[in-house]
Image (spheres, grey):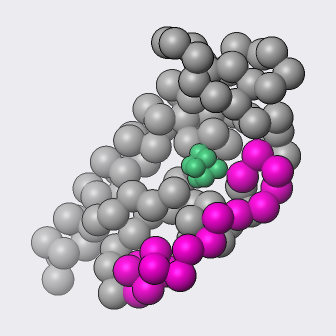
Amino acid sequence: MYLISACLAGVNCRYNGGNNQCDWVKQFMKDKDCLLVCPEEMGGLSTPRPPSERIGSKVISKDGQDVTDNFLTGAEKSIQKAEETAAELEQEIAGN
Ligand code: SF4
């Protein structure tokens, strides 16, 4: 299974409410099990939202908020979701 950034698949979850749709990614996904995730949203950030950047060990939004915990939480939830989905797929395959 492949974990794909949702915005690359055309989901409007970027900070500005848009996406980064990538034809190559959509082509890649056609014949594979893929899970779309947006760790920023999964970490509790809204869309649209101020853009953020990593500064040292922190992630700071353009309006000065420390959103490090949101990014860490979103990454953890993404991994957890991937593990749950992989386990479900394994059960489906084993049941066939
Ligand atoms: S966190 Fe969301 S908006 Fe940011 S790159 Fe990943 S999928 Fe795209």
Q: Which residues are magenta?
A: 14-30
Q: Residue at x 22, y 65 (%)?
A: 91
Based on the picture, tell me whether residue 46 belongs to the magenta stretch.
no
Horizontal side of 52 relative to 2 (left or right) equals: right
Residue plotted at (32% across, 79% down): 32
Using the image as rendered, state which of residue 74 and residue 67 is in the foreground.
Answer: 67
Where, by quadrant of the figure, is residue 43 drawn? Answer: top right
Place residue 80 in its image quadrant. top left
- The answer to whether residue 70 shows anywhere in this view is no
Tell which of 34 and 50 is nearer to you: 50
Left/right placement of residue 70 relative to residue 83 reads right
> Whole-percent x and y of residue 74?
54, 35
Residue 8 location in percent, x, y?
56, 65
Query: Vertical placement of 52 versus 64: above or below?
Result: below
Quarter of the image for the N terminus: give it: bottom left
Is 18 magenta? The answer is yes
Q: Residue at x 44, y 32 (%)?
A: 76
Q: Is residue 45 visible?
A: yes
Where does the image place residue 13, in percent across and percent down from the top left?
Answer: 71, 55
Q: Nearer the viewer, residue 96 or 75?
A: 75
Residue 38, position as x, y percentages in the image? 58, 50
**What residue is shown at x 18% (from left), y 75% (from top)?**
93
Q: Looking at the image, is 23 positioned above or below residue 89?
A: below
